Image: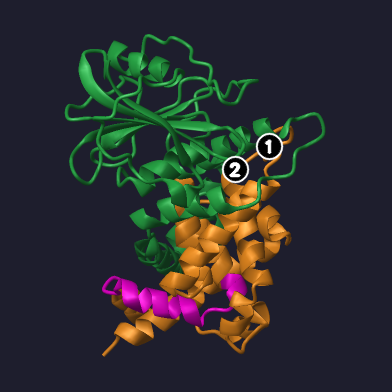
Amino acid sequence: MLALFSVGELDAAQRETVSAHLLDCDRCWNELRAQRLVIGAVQQLWEPAPTGLRADIHAAIAAAPQPRSAPGIPRRRMVLLAAALVAAIIGGSVVAVRISSAPDRPQVAATSAIPAAVQAAITQADGTPPADSSVPTAPTLSRMGLRLAASGSTKAADIPTAQYTYADSTGHRLTVFVAARAWPRPARADTINSTAWIITPTALTVVGGPDQAGDAMLIIASDHTAAMTAAAALGLI
Amino acid sequence: MPHLDMLHTLARRLCQGRREDAEDLVQEVMLRAFAAWRPENPPRSMAAWLGRICINTAASAGRRRRARPLEAHDDVALLALAEPTRTDILALARVEADAIASAMNRLSSGQREVITLVDLCGFTTGEVARILEVPRGTVLSRLFRGHQALAVGLAERVSP
């Protein structure tokens, strides 16, 4: 009874009984004080996960075999749902996971929570960037099994931008926008760290923030794990 | 990041404070959770589900067995343990985190698991019973006896 009392799991009537007993019993009173002091002491051992562990987990999951599909659920959908699980555990939010039937053309839903500049960049990620030989060297994502499929320079909502589109061996795509000036942060974005944010409109993950050189970056992918792994590889998180 | 922090805290205690082992354990738990996740049949409590995977993973990897203290029969061995005195209680107020971690490591694995899950991770004793697949009475006994052992052990360490 005292153990339950000390962890707050008794109902009101039981609490009354124990409280009344404690008034008259030195032994139980001392026992309870000791239990509570121990609980307080033990709680000093709460240890939040170190920052690097999150990126390590994303990388490990990205490299792991994909989960077995449940009957009736396409493998692609399983990957996205598993990514939603990871987001739920590690942080970030998955507002809704809507599945694109064509994996290389992510569906984009207009949403008022996303500033026009970011929405324009997301929409643009659905197309092939205009060829331009003057764009800076593309960030390397070959460690993730991504090859550069197209690059170009453009303007995303009036912000001069270099656009790089990568693809993996199955045709899934990931787009990185790089600009000297940051796009506005969406109102509903979740904070990843002091500079990076994430938003997941429908079946997409969009991660924004500066890279290590201070350039503004926007990473857009239909695969959450890929977007987060790229964000870690490019130094956003 | 409530679940990740909870998992990390749990892993640190299960690995008796060894940082690298704990981080490896958390990664392994996440990979197992990733593989076991079934969207059509999600767990009722994500935290409890992950806690159970963490406990089972630590056990199957032998992490607990390697580090397990000799006294395996915690509930019996601690029946004879002295109750905390007033001096013990005064000493407890001055105890520091290192001393607590060290005293936790000297507990039996069963007590350490229960105390970590209840006091640190915030699970109820009913949830812990389901996670560990033991009766709730066993959880309560381990919790109570574990607290007693910690009270006495910690007081000994900080007393002059």
Q: Amino acid at mark 1?
A: Pro
Element at label 1: loop
Residue A2 visible in image: no
* Residue at image mark 2: B46
* Residue at image mark 1: B42
Element at label 2: helix
Subunit bearing disc 2 = B
Q: Which chain is orange?
A: B
Residue B31 visible in image: yes
Task: Say whether residue A150 is magenta.
Answer: no
Against A51, residue A184 (above or below) is above
Q: Residue at x 39, y 17 (%)?
A: A124
Direction from residue A136 to residue B112 in the image, left or right:
right
Q: CA distance from mark 2 to mark 1?
A: 8 Å
Percent from the top left, x then y, of residue B85?
40, 80
The reply to the same-chain question for discs 2 and 1 is yes
